[in-house]
Image (cartoon, rainbow, N blue to C red):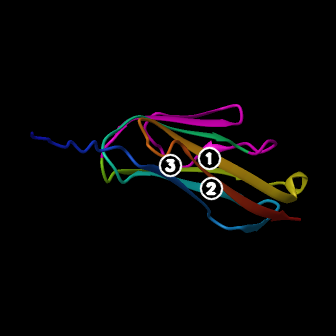
Amino acid sequence: QSSASITIACPDVSVVKAALDDLISAGETAQFDITVANSGADAFNAALSDLLPAGLGWTLTTPAQGCSIVGQTLTCDFGTLAPGASIEVSVAAIASADDCGTITNTACSMVIRNPTGGTNRTLTLQVYR
């Protein structure tokens, strides 16, 4: 009797989100930096989705492959994310007095064949008058 084993390598995609400043005043720039990284095997159809806080005019501050903002939604289609690869995406908007309070933002990474599924990260930003 004889046996053999095969190890199947899977992608391990994560998303990390940070605010450039977590406390800003009206008239200042609110900026979120989002990093999507793969610490596993090739991640096919890697993507990022982020429903940005309403009421602000969000723009991409760093060009990133396959990224766009339509309405309040940031979407990125990265294609294949190689092992050890990471992509950073930054979005920014000028806060007004109407935005005072807390701005909360969640991003989700998605990939086909990710053993842990998509990863969500939430970040809170305070805006003061």
Which of the two residues, 42 or 76, is positioned nearer the viewer here?
42
Which of the two residues, 28 or 9, is positioned nearer the viewer here?
9
Which of the two residues, 14 or 113, is positioned nearer the viewer here?
113
Q: Tag 2, which secondary structure?
A: strand
Q: Which residues are magenta?
A: 53-82
Q: Residue at x 21, y 42 (%)?
A: 6
Instruction: Report the amino acid beneath label 3.
Output: Thr
Instruction: Report the amino acid beneath label 1.
Output: Ala
> In the current view of this chain or complex, which residue is farthest to the left?
1
Q: Residues under labels 3 and 2: Cα distance? A: 11 Å
Contact between marks 1 and 2 (CB within 8 A): the answer is: yes
Q: Which residue is mark 2?
A: 32
Q: Residue at x 66, y 35 (%)?
A: 73
Residue 61 forms part of the magenta stretch: yes
Quadrant in the rendering for residue 24: bottom right
Instruction: Report the amino acid beneath label 2.
Output: Phe
Q: Is residue 129 left or right of residue 45?
A: right
Q: Residue at x 43, y 38 (%)?
A: 65
The N terminus appears in which quarter of the rendering? top left
| Local crowd size for mark 1, using a 10 Å CA cut-off: few (<14), some (14–19), many (≥20) | many
Residue 62 shows which numbered tag? 3
Q: Which of the two marks, 3 or 1, is nearer to us in this view? A: 1
- Residue 90's place in the image compared with 117, above or below, is below
The C terminus appears in which quarter of the rendering? bottom right
Q: Tag 3, which secondary structure?
A: loop
Q: How far across and how far down the image is residue 100, in percent?
A: 88, 58
